[in-house]
Image: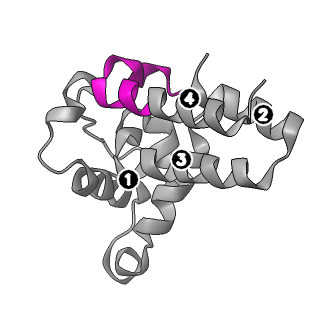
Amino acid sequence: MAVIAVAKAVRTVGGKRAFNSVLCDFIAVLSYLSVAIFDEAALRKAAGNPRGCQPLQLPDIRRLEQLPDPKDILYELLCKASGLTGRRLKQFSVNERVHRLAELIDDFSPLRALSAFQLLETEIQQVIKTQGWCS
């Protein structure tokens, strides 16, 4: 079972504040690792332009771990997806949008092909088990 699915289930059943904090940290880690680059619809929605038609060149998911600076690529994609220019683009809060992007992605399963994601998922499962947040 995906960590995110376990996390949602435990949050609704257990309602522990500590778990919610770890879940938020987990999502933040995912977004800062820039693994959210794979979901174009979520990128556009997070950028505030869900019906945008600007062409976005998303990197191949199998090569995400090889990108020299995926965070910069993610930021550029969000700016491009917003469709904003000039002053409005300068006022565009990319950091805020990155967090929104992590909230919008429901299915992280395509990332299981990445060794870094597999390691992160294993570590999160260990924390959940160690803290007794899942029965």
Name the residue that disc number 2 marks: 10
Which is nearer the N-term, disc 3 or disc 2?
A: 2
Q: Residue at point 49% right, 61% down?
A: 97
Q: Quadrant of residue 107?
A: top right
Q: Residue at point 14% right, 34% down?
A: 66
Name the residue that disc number 1 marks: 32
The amino acid at mark 1 is Tyr
The colour scheme used to paint the residues is one colour
Name the residue that disc number 3 marks: 27
The amino acid at mark 3 is Ile
Task: For mark 2, give the secondary structure.
Answer: helix
In the image, 28: left or right of 106? left
From the image, which quarter does the N terminus lie in? Answer: top right
The amino acid at mark 4 is Gln
Q: Is residue 26 above or below residue 83?
A: above
Which is nearer the N-term, disc 2 or disc 1?
A: 2
Label 4 packing within 10 angstroms: few (<14), some (14-19), many (20+):
many
Which range of residues does the magenta coloring cover? 107-120
* Dominant SS type (magenta): helix
Q: Are marks 1 and 3 in contact (CB under 8 Å)?
A: no
Rendering coords of residue 35 (x, y %): 37, 39
In the image, 127: left or right of 67? right
Rendering coords of residue 63 (x, y %): 19, 28
Q: CA distance from mark 2 to mark 4?
A: 12 Å
Q: Are marks 2 and 4 in contact (CB under 8 Å)?
A: no
Rendering coords of residue 78 (x, y %): 38, 55
Label 3 packing within 10 angstroms: few (<14), some (14-19), many (20+):
some
Foreground residue, 83 or 96? 96
From the image, which quarter does the C terminus lie in? Answer: top right
